[in-house]
Amino acid sequence: GAGVSQSPRYKVAKRGQDVALRCDPISGHVSLFWYQQALGQGPEFLTYFQNEAQLDKSGLPSDRFFAERPEGSVSTLKIQRTQQEDSAVYLCASSATSGRNTGELFFGEGSRLTVL
Amino acid sequence: AQKITQTQPGMFVQEKEAVTLDCTYDTSDPSYGLFWYKQPSSGEMIFLIYQGSYDQQNATEGRYSLNFQKARKSANLVISASQLGDSAMYFCAMRGWYNQGGKLIFGQGTELSVKP
């Protein structure tokens, strides 16, 4: 499809396991964002890429969270040694432009992570 | 710091009636944009409407309009002629002039239920 694609849609992990969440943005989109959405809450910013450069990672909650976008297209969010408080929906969004004039963000359907 | 506040956790509206979802914001940025997104149970964030802080007129998009009152720092969403398919979570979001890459800051959301 032409939209933002995320996989897996659902992931159950045991506490302490590592997980990797994938985001395939709209082709040609420069900007890519990751958000974390806890149950009943609004999305919280995690990190931002402009092409392959990670320009803002101020929202990553701990050093267990790591994101990459090596070729400026697909991005992976990795969570090491998962904990129960990591249970959330992880949303990826992309945009055709960057900077202050960034237009609309297009979101994927999210990856729902449950840590047991 | 930027902050978005949505004070209505849940709202009910009768089908075909209009409903207003409240949003107030706080920012010291000289210029900013305000967004409303809809999130149905499928999880995807759907863009509804955008208002720039220097736009002279309130934004409208079909049945959606944004009641922008800059002095009061409010950006309420008005949905006219509600439909059953409007039942969803609604999020107000802001992009400040200094936001790296144009990241959005979201409110806590309002759950709208449309009654037949």
Image (spheres, coloured by chain):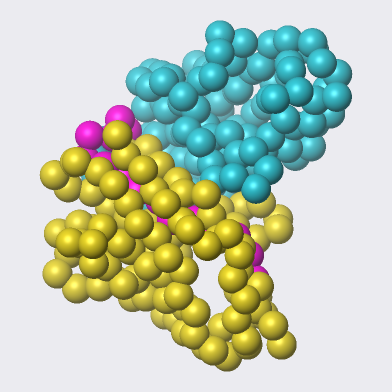
Chain colours: A cyan, B yellow
Please count the marks in the image.
0
Q: Does the segment drawn in magenta span residue A103? A: no
Q: Main secondary structure of the magenta part?
A: strand
Extreme residue toward the bottom, this view: B16
Q: Would you say B45 lies left or right of A9 here?
A: left
- Residue at 65% x, 48% y is A40
Percent coordinates x, y for residue B45 in the rendering: 56, 53
Q: Would you say A48 lies left or right of A42 here?
A: left
Indicate the quadrant where residue B112 lies.
bottom right
- Residue at 51% x, 36% y is A44
Question: Which residue range is magenta in the image?
Answer: B87-101
Q: Does the segment drawn in magenta span residue B89? A: yes
Indicate the quadrant where residue A112 lies.
top right
- Residue at 79% x, 37% y is A10
Percent coordinates x, y for residue B95 in the rendering: 31, 45
Viewer can see residue B16? yes
Q: Would you say A8 lies left or right of B113 here?
A: right
- Please name whichever residue, A22 or A1, is drawn nearer the observer in this view of the structure: A22
